Image: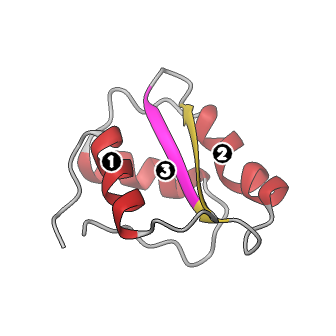
Amino acid sequence: MDIFSSVLTENLQKIKTLLPAEDILVHEFTSADGVNCALVFADGVVDKPVLGDLAARPLTRLSLGKLTGKKRAEAVKGVLLFPELKEATE
């Protein structure tokens, strides 16, 4: 598989191509400073309100614009309330 790019729309298109099922949903939003973000999840497997509380809301309050690479990943991991969070690059 190709490595993800730095362009969110390209990555979402790759994901939609790999996972074309109708129950794979994408929720797009922006961080506190306007960085585009997205959650990709399986409908019916994920509790949407819980996902919002544990991921989307904390990320919308986070300022990511000046952070890059590992510092950005660490900031994201710091606000997400998931015990087994892993970063994927491919």
Nearer the observer, disc 1 or disc 2?
2
Which residue is at a point 60% across and 51% down the rendered structure image? 79
Mark 2 surroundings: few (<14), some (14-19) or many (≥20) residues within 10 A: many
Answer with the quarter of the image where residue 67 lies.
top left
Mark 3 surroundings: few (<14), some (14-19) or many (≥20) residues within 10 A: some
Residue 16, image x, y percentages: 41, 58
Residue bearing the label numbered 3: 76
Answer with the quarter of the image where residue 1 lies.
bottom left
Which residue is at a point 81% across and 59% down the rendered structure image? 50
Residue 66, image x, y percentages: 32, 27
Q: Which residues are magenta?
A: 35-40
Q: CA distance from mark 3 to mark 2?
A: 11 Å
Residue bearing the label numbered 1: 71
Check the image and name the residue furthest to the left: 2
Which of disc 2 and disc 1 is earlier in sequence? 2
Residue bearing the label numbered 2: 56
Amino acid type at image mark 2: Ala
Q: Are marks 1 and 2 in contact (CB under 8 Å)?
A: no
Nearer the observer, disc 3 or disc 1?
3
On the picture, is 15 further left or further right than 79? left
Q: Are marks 3 and 1 in contact (CB under 8 Å)?
A: no
